[in-house]
Amino acid sequence: MTGDGRAAPARLTGFAFVAPFLALYVFLLIVPLVMGIAISFHRADLFGTRRWAGLDNYARLATDPVFHQSLGNTFALTLLIVPVLTAITLALALALNRPARSAAVFRGIFFSSSVLSVTIVTLIWRFVLTPDGGLAAKLLTAFGYAPLPFLSDPALTIPAIAITTIWWCLGLPMMLFLAGLQQIPHDLYEAAALDGARGWTVFRRVTLPSLRGTLVTVVMLQTAGQLQLFGQAQLLTGGGPGGASRPVVLFIYEVAFGRWELGYATAAAQVLFVLVLALTGLQYWLVARREPVR
Amino acid sequence: MSSPGASLVLDQVRKAYGATQVLDGVSLTMAANEFVAFLGPSGSGKSTLLRIIAGLESLDGGEVRLGERRIDGLAPGDRDVAMVFQHYALYPHMSVRDNMAFGLRNAKVPAGEIATRIAGAAKSLEIEALLDRKPGQLSGGQRQRVAIGRAIIKNPALFLLDEPLSNLDAALRNRTRVELAQLRQRTDAAFIMVTHDQAEAMTLADRIVVMNDRRIQQVGTPMEIYARPANSFVARFVGTPAMTLAAGTATTDADGFAQVRLGDGSVVATRVPFAHLGNDTNVQLGLRPEQVACVAPGDTGVQAEAILVERLGDRSFVYARLADGQDIIAHDGGGCGVRIGDRIGMRIDGAAAAVFGSDGTAHHADAAP
Amino acid sequence: MSRGADRLSVPALIGLLIGAGIMVAPLVWTLLLSLKSNAELLRDSASAFSVPYTADNYRAIFAGSLVPRWLLNSSIVALGTTAGVLVLCSLAGYGFARFEFPFRRTLFAFVVVGLAIPEQAVILPRHQLFAWLGLHNSYPGLILPGLVAPFGVLFMTQYIRAIPRELDEAAMLDGASRLKLFLTVLLPLTIPAQATLGVFTFLGAWNDYWWPLISATTSDRYTLTVGLASSQMNYAQTSGLGFLMAQAVFASVPILVVYVLFQKQIVRAMAGTAVR
């Protein structure tokens, strides 16, 4: 459209601007993606040995109880974290969507944990949760209860990781909901008020339908994120006890860097990749099917 | 930079976007220091033509020459043209001074000379006090003047004005119109203005290029365009209210002039030589409101029913409907007493009327000797 | 602002205060622990609630620990990634937004697809690739993967598209080349977008864990994130709880400073994700 001459070099000027990014994009994302698919069909170790294995790795995954356990853990974590996180952050956004100074302070507090790295978060929470002198233990003792072994009881490790994750991840969805609320035209509320709608009805009939797009975004982003949960589990419980809190990514890490079975780990990574795409795609489809999100 | 004899020549300029032809063999020659307006509805190709001259669009065929040089292959900055954009296009992050200096700095004009030129332009446009402000701090009219200043300072051979008045309110528009007219007097450059506003074109331009449907429809002085439109498109597009085009059948009178029988049976004698029509007798009679007088209804002459009266104070326009449903606009005095629904008579002066053939081509009376 | 002027109801306010308490308590707890001597904490961690407090643990960080080194590494990696992303995404955004070239639409769609590729799908092969190239335990090895930011390209493309094309055209008529008009006219106008994308990238690079964990394997190449992880895992053998917590606090400070300074951009980045 903005023709500045018909010569071939001018037609390629634009290409020169996008080329540096594209080169890195291909080299660092597309090439590894293809390599990953290829490696998953090989018996390969971390040091370069390769032997064609066909579907062996995938067949092994299908019968590996450790992998199955990690899949179960990942689903459990995702199912625990995503709904709770979504509900809490929506409530927070509704409460804090006002211009008052105090609301800004609260927003700052609830967002602040999001800027910390996973290592700091787990460091903090380890010494909150540890029964041996942690803050939670101190509080429980103060109220006359026995300290709970959050980090070593198989029934408690997954909730402990979930609590830590929710504490860490509140900021982004809250901000997304706040941004979504800001987009709702004010006259919708005025119309609802004129129709005599109040409180819960306004929320059900006006706020929630208007937030549908944001809700889908939050749930999809969180599902994709929590299916890939890694650092919290590795650092808080090490996946233990007995693999009771080992998520899929930790399984991949351990297989690749503990047992050096690169081919097997890569196959597991492909399974996870497909899972992430399928589940987020399914969520999008379920919503978009009824009416376009945007 | 500008040479006094510089003039723009467009030779068979063609442009297409994919399969869509937007300019189809456009040719035009401008005299030095001429002010030409490109007038036409949106989509007529007038903006594309301006952008081709500026170098913002490439052409698919033909030539653009300015003075002695062929410019259609040159970069926009090397063409010796300056443009005033519709939305001003001032650089928001630069002061007014830097906005004006940007082009000269790119052209490696010495700093001292840039300062002199800015001072001169700022003085003539009365924007000296604004030189250190940013565009965001200026009113619409001030921005417009800065945009003009940025063009003036380059001292180009040709100014390109893209709908320069369309974003201004009525008062500012008049003021800017005066400023453009004065600017035009001060420089020996040529001007091209793109507009869809005929009043603007009629006021400012030496010649108007009426464009429609990828082609130039007519090139002429404002009065030529108004009085002797080349075809029915130009006839309807120029003039407010629009010219009435009444369908009828042409026959010849004793003197060899065409007379047109309208649908209701009334006959209007024109001064258009019947021979000009060839054998094409299914015509449209073109009548400006000033050629149709509103008179008292009577037994003879054209009878009609008033359907709208537009009162302008010093004069009125009566929109009336003939018995066969044909609408005609007539003029009357400011004190016109006609009401909607009244029966009126009309006196049609066919001496200056035009006759349009079935292909839309206009036939006029021979020019007075 | 829905019902913006309304005051919070009392139950809502109580809920918020409890929530804020849960947010802040672990941070305060960490801060208190970091200010206690390790010996005292070994007897009873509840001593964190009472005097005496000491800055010994912080002194220990500077006296011969690797933490300052990790801080330097993190700074280099995060700043390098940010600078690289801004340059690459601005250039690509300009190219996609303002030029017509063969396969432009296809290439743009190709970049958008990248948004859907999770890190898990590429991290192991990328580790292999970098091993072959000898890039592990080096700054380029830590920075390069972060430079692939499809979101940034999308963001800059959309931002530049929203700038009126008339400005480009005015600059061209003013004799500026495409590169010069990019540098002198468009780039200054994208500063808000640069700030948003920059802060977003900086936070991501600073906090990244998975990649530096497997790429930086010698302790002097650790970033702060990986270094703290190693301290955490070796906790039993190291010099104690207070020292560990001092490291956590120390590592939080730079990022909290960035957060406070760039709060506006961070919020805008979040909102941008939603509006997209």
Image (cartoon, rainbow, N blue to C red):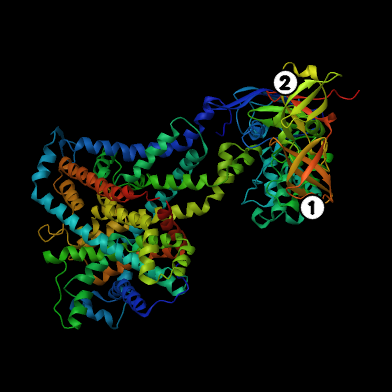
Please provide percent x and percent y for residue B200. Answer: 75, 42
Percent x, y for residue B149?
A: 74, 46
Residue in the image at 25% along x and 36% along y = A35
Quarter assignment of residue C32: bottom left
Horizontal and vertical percent for residue C49? 27, 81
Q: Residue B126 — which label?
A: 1
Q: Residues within 10 Å of mark 2 (few under 14, many from 20)?
A: some
The answer to whether B47 appears left or right of B278 in the picture is: left
Q: Chain of mark 1?
A: B
Q: CA distance from mark 1 to mark 2?
A: 59 Å
Q: Please tell me how many numbered marks the rendered image carries.
A: 2
Residue corresponding to mark 2: B281
Q: Is residue C7 left or right of residue A88?
A: right
Specify the amino acid type for callout 1: Glu
Nearer to us in this view, A248 or A216: A216
On residue B190, the disc is none
Q: Nearer the viewer, residue B193 or A246?
A: B193
Mark 1 closeness class: few <14, some 14–19, many ≥20 residues within 10 Å: few
